[in-house]
Image: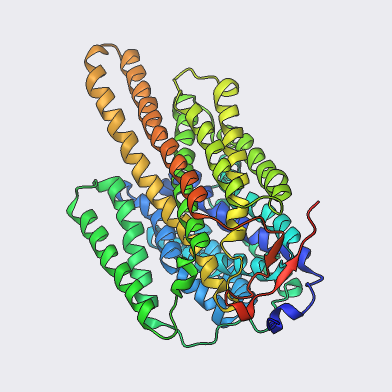
Amino acid sequence: MPKIPETTAVQADPGRWKALIFIALAQLMVVLDATIVNIALPSAQQDLGISDGNRQWVITAYALAFGGLLLFGGRIADLWGRKRTFVTGLIGFAAASALGGAATGEAMMLGARALQGAFGALLAPAALSLLAVTFTDAKERAKAFGIYGAIAGGGGAVGLILGGFLTEYLNWRWTFFVNIPFAVVAAVGAYLVVREPAGGRNRSPLDIPGVILSTLGLVALVYGFTRAESAGWSDAGTIGLFVGSGVLLVAFVVTEYLVKHPLLPLRVVTNRNRGGVYLSLGLAVIAMFGLFLFLTYYLQVVKGYSPVKTGFAFLPMIAGMIVGSTQIGTRLMTRVPPRFLMAPGFLTAGVGMLLLTQLEIGTSYAGLILPAQLLLGLGMGTAFMPAMSLATLGVDPRDAGVASAMVNTSQQVGGAIGTALLNTIAASATTAYLADHAAGATTPAAQKLVQLQGMVEGYAAAIWWAVGILAVSATIAFVLINTGKPETGVVAGSGERADDEVKVPVIAH
């Protein structure tokens, strides 16, 4: 008779659905922040006198702190308690946002962005691991992760709409100040409603060498891709960052194998199903981040849309994600194996991306961009939801924080790679097109047309790569993820050892 851990013996938390509201609100705030500042950047740069050379640091400072500290943040959540870490992260994020909104110069702005990233790295893994240990029934878990997956996938597009509104009708500073009410409501609600199951903390000593190696390795990796975008792939500094990152991350893996209490227990990532989720999700995010970037520029520069109109142009993708996540994913998650949702989901998104390779200067929004976005949203929403759930399913409660951090890390690194890699491909294709066609453009109007056509050619070339990446992502999900239909689901955070495992019966309709 298997031993039932204390964490699974207690009844389901009666306030779990209220808790989901505040966890989802916090997740929305973090995801919004990844895109909302992009739209405000030109105005902020002008007001604060930030040079063209340093403006990328407004984005990069956040990405480096967030991506570099995620594993540490996940471990802090396991050690200190997820609820306490979650609330602390929210309060810190609100304070950093207030600092950014009140920035009077470049240094203050960059400092605020780095602080936002650091507190986001506390907040994001704590939010996902709270969700994992709160919803243990397989059918309820499907619904909860459906909502969470829709927010995680569609929040970036919501950020474009909100950023456009705030920048156009109020002031760029409100793209920072808007976080404060989100954070305050989520923090107060979480403090009052969220109830963390007892006995799930990991009180073992903190792995300081692991913290240092993982943080420096991830920062070097994210910065390497960011630098590649501006300085080029053959730049000595870029190559040095990649080599340094590789050495640090290999040293981190060796350290985790050797130490008694690792920051990231290797069992978390060597599990076939979780490894498949981290890899396929990271690749899918590469494709998605590139698309957000190119479609934003296409709509604003080529089609002449305003920031607000551009934001609204992304609504079909959000609608598709919500339907894919809450209707398709949630309804089928307890009936079919996860790979039969994830692989077709990524392929559906790939078909949507394939449509966008046909972009031209005069492309109709309703005829091509809208159906492409619907397919992208449906596909990604369907795939994201089981991926988010599977990434933390069956993890030992002591490892829930770092397992959640790995989901965020794969997305963050994927985003950095996607922006740099696809931007470089687009820029190369644009340069090649201009070199072939510029000589024939003798009038200003013809020159402008060639410039625009060159941009569109570049976007199409990069989007072809995104199609290929999504196909690889679907293949990885189908081949690596082999867990069966969850008619009985391991209680989240109940452990992977045989003597710790408890099955939750689910009646399939």
Instruction: Decide: is 201 above or below 281.
Output: below
Q: Position of residue 38 (x, y in %)?
A: 47, 46
| Observer able to see residue 164 | no
- In percent of the image, x 67 and y 71: which residue is there? 133
Q: Position of residue 236 (x, y in %)?
A: 17, 54
For the residue pair 85 and 49, the one nearer the viewer reads as: 85
Instruction: Decide: is 341 above or below 134.
Output: above
Q: Position of residue 15 (x, y in %)?
A: 80, 69
**Image quadrant in which you'd find residue 216:** bottom left
- In percent of the image, x 29 and y 52: which residue is there? 227
Answer with left or right where residue 86 lies relative to residue 263: right
Q: What's the colour scheme?
A: rainbow
Which residue sits furthest front? 1
For the residue pair 355 and 172, the one nearer the viewer reads as: 355
Answer with left or right where residue 1 lies relative to residue 266: right
Answer with left or right where residue 297 lies relative to residue 186: left
Q: Tell me the quadrant of the picture where the N terminus can be found.
A: bottom right
Instruction: Decide: is 59 above or below 364.
Output: below
Q: Position of residue 299 (x, y in %)?
A: 50, 29
So how many labels did they put on this image? Answer: 0
| Observer able to see residue 113 | yes
- In percent of the image, x 72 and y 72: which residue is there? 194
- In percent of the image, x 56 and y 36: which residue is there? 348
